[in-house]
Image: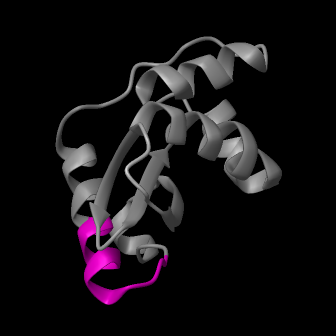
């Protein structure tokens, strides 16, 4: 996923970005599991995000290679939303996580 995010940024004339693999990524993972348990996607409350913007996404998972899915999600689906594009292209810090549960992939990307 990190490689795909940076590939998307380069394709849009933006520099690559360091992606957190720490506390914020853990928060992203927790949010993915919450969405998976509840069976739908939603944004975390603003007080929980503490200045970070959030992309949430859910799609069916059929055993496809996760790198291929990441490319399709970012280059095709998230690209269609001006808000999602802004987070992916304008953030100077980023964290992400995904969970696969019951044949669905839940994705959270946070940027600031």
In terms of depth relative to the viewer, which is nearer, 21 or 74? Answer: 74
Could you tell me if residue 94 is visible in this image?
no
Relative to 14, residue 90 above or below: below
**Measuring 37% from the left and 73% from the top, which residue is drawn there?**
47
Provide residue 102's location: percent of width, then percent of height.
29, 74
**Residue at x-position 21% and y-position 64%:** 30
User: Where's residue 41, x and y in %?
Assistant: 48, 77
Is residue 29 positioned above or below 59 on the image?
A: above
Q: Please indicate whether residue 69 sits to the left or right of residue 24 in the image.
A: right
Residue 34 x %, y %: 27, 77
Please say whether residue 83 is one of the residues in the magenta stretch.
no
For the point 49% across and 66% down, the residue is: 60
Residue under the point 41% across and 73% down: 44
The answer to whether residue 108 is above or below residue 93 is below
In the figure, is residue 86 to the left or right of 57?
right
Span of residues in magenta:
31-42
Residue situated in front as seen by the camera: 35 or 49: 35
Q: Main secondary structure of the magenta part?
A: helix
């Amino acid at each position: 996923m990190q490689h795909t995010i940076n590939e998307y940024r380069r394709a849009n004339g933006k520099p690559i970005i360091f992606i957190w693999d720490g506390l914020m990524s853990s928060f992203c993972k927790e949010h993915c599991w919450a969405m998976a348990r509840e069976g739908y996607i939603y944004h975390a409350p603003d007080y929980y995000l503490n200045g970070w913007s959030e992309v949430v996404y859910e799609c069916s998972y059929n055993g496809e290679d996760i790198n291929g899915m990441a490319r399709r999600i970012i280059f095709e689906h998230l690209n269609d939303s001006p808000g999602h594009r802004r987070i992916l292209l304008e953030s100077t810090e980023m964290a992400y996580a995904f969970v696969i549960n019951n044949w669905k992939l839940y994705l959270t990307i946070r940027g600031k």
